[in-house]
Image (tube, grey):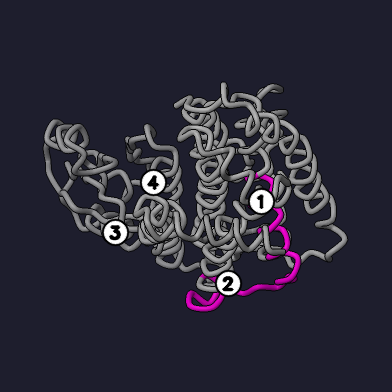
Amino acid sequence: MTAMRAVLRREWEDIRASPLAQAQLLWLPVATIALLWAVFIRGTATELPLAVVDLDSSSASRQLVRSLDASPGLAVTLRTESLETARSAVRRGDVEGIVLIPADFLRDLKRGQVSEVTAWFNAQFLLTGNVLSRELQTGVLTFSAQVSAGSRLARGDSKTAVEINLQPIAARRDTLHNPYLNYEPFLVAGLAAAVVQMFAMLGAVRVVGRELRDGTAGEWLATGDGSIMTAVVGKLVWPTVSGVVVGAAFLAGLHGWSGWPMPGSWAVLLGGLVLMVLAYEGLGLLVLGMTANYRLASSVAAFVTAPALAFAGLTFPLSSMPAAAEAWGRVLPLTAFVRLQIEQAGRGSPVLESWPELSWLGGVALVSLTCALPLLRKRARAPECWGRR
């Protein structure tokens, strides 16, 4: 215990003396998560700007424009009679879509003829394109239903007959696990987990790698009384505490301050968070032990963690990825934690259902740390490995 306290004290003095270490342990993860949270705090994409080219300028066309503008995902910010003006607004990024209402729109409706409304939307950004497509369809269908109902009522049809004709089959849709269709409770949570795993792996590389880089690995090992286990555990205490506290504070804010329900087990979720932090720290130390190069190990850590969320199956399903990408995604500890997070915070799954994810996270942590220790002992005792930046 004396040796452990000595390593902890030595590491604490380094943190106190290094603003960079303080930033990496606390301020940068907190600031990054706060920034991501601020971006997605609204939860859903609303009021996307839309241009309407109204060539009819009739009461019917104005009613259609009001129907589109009433859709929560749309905001008619430009009305013009020039299609080129609307296209220029799209190219400038002022609007995301265009709706063209043809001339004689009202006349065709009165004659009972089909009147075609043309819409263009920017699908360069998938979310924007999907929202626009859905809202445009909803707005036009709502207007069409209103016109059809008014026409039938004018011909003397009963209100019941009109309702049956407009919707002969009524579909009931119940949304499970995120019925608000909100991005905050699952996407921000995934992004926060991605930030934690990134700083966990990079932090582990830093705290041990600097000893090799600065040629103080021998002194570090001696402080641990020659035990690589004591020396490494003493190094990882502060980064582990920081990663777990930051991740837990975010989850508490999400399910407390923001009010999102937590139907599952807090113990399982927090246990998974601890195991994920340890797994990435173990991977960072394993890479460092294999390379004995601070800069190279940091680059590998960034390569593994920076794009990890894209392979976690949160924004794009794993089963639809190419085989190599799917295999890589399933290996990553972040994928297991994201799945665990969805099971507990989203679905309220039984604890046993999350056992595979907990087992994988614990297994990666155990295997990587076990393999890293002898490599690090070898590097710490070999002066020829020191000083590599």
Local secondary structure at mark 2: helix
> What type of secondary structure mainly makes up the magenta span?
helix
Q: Which is more N-terminal, label 4 or label 3?
A: 3
Secondary structure state at the residue bearing disc 3: helix
Residue marked by disc 2: 160
Asked whether residue 99 appears in the rendered view, the answer is no
The Cα atoms of the two marked residues, 3 and 2, are separated by 29 Å
Dot in front, 3 or 4: 4
Check contact, mark 3 vs mark 2: CB within 8 A. Answer: no
Q: Residues within 10 Å of mark 4 (few under 14, many from 20)?
A: many
The kind of residue on which mark 4 rests is Leu
Gap in angstroms between the C-alphas marked 4 and 1: 61 Å
Label ID, residue 132: 4
Query: In whole angstroms, how far apart are the C-alphas of marks 2 and 1?
Result: 83 Å
Q: Earlier in the sequence, mark 4 or mark 1?
A: 4
Quarter holding the C terminus is top left
For badge 3, the amino acid type reads Asp
- Residue at the disc numbered 1: 224
Q: Is residue 220 magenta?
A: no
